[in-house]
Image (spheres, rainbow, N blue to C red):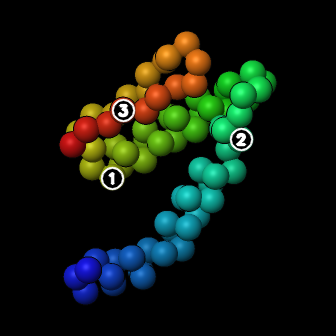
Amino acid sequence: MSQVWKEYQEQNQERFLKEMMDLLRIPSISAKSEHKEDMIRCAEAVKASLLASGCDKAEVMDTGGHPVVYGEK
């Protein structure tokens, strides 16, 4: 790992942890239908994160069940 990347990780560690914890707090892994909106909210958060990270395209795809997030660079 390059020194520049290591420094970037260290400087942004708190932000990375906050973003991960915010995502993990969404009750999105569930077979219970009452969490359907949470699963969609989580998928939208992952999509936003992919776009913010530099993906050229990201979308949430409806599957009739749990949503799928697709991204490409």
Q: Residues within 10 Å of mark 1 (few under 14, many from 20)?
A: few
Picture layout, residue 62 above or below residue 18:
above
Tag 1: amino acid: Ser
Residue 62 place in picture, x, y as percent: 49, 18
Image point 47% across, 42% down: which residue?
46
Q: Is residue 36 above or below residue 10?
A: above
x, y (%) of residue 26? Answer: 67, 44
* Callout 3 crowding tier (Cα within 10 Å): few <14, some 14–19, many ≥20: some
Q: From this viewpoint, which residue is outermost toward the front?
A: 31
Q: Residue furthest top?
A: 64
Q: How many marks?
A: 3
Q: Quadrant of residue 56?
A: top left
**SS at badge 1:** loop
Q: Position of residue 59 (x, y in %)?
A: 38, 28
Identify residue for label 2: 27
Q: Foreground: 1 or 73?
A: 1
Left or right: residue 52 compared with residue 1: right
Q: Which residue is mark 1?
A: 53
Residue to which mark 3 is pinned = 70
Amino acid under disc 3: Tyr
Choose the circle earlier in sequence order: 2 or 1. 2
Choose the circle earlier in sequence order: 2 or 3. 2
- Graded by Cα atoms within 10 Å as few (under 14), some (14 to 19) or many (20 or more), the crowding at tag 2 reads some
Q: Amino acid at mark 2?
A: Pro
Q: Quadrant of residue 14?
A: bottom right
**Residue at position x 71%, y 41% in the image:** 27
Q: Image quadrant for the C terminus?
A: top left
Task: Measure how far apart labels 2 and 1 are at the Cα level.
Answer: 23 Å
Left or right, 22 with respect to 72, comes to right
Q: CA distance from mark 2 to mark 3?
A: 20 Å
Secondary structure under tag 3 reads: strand
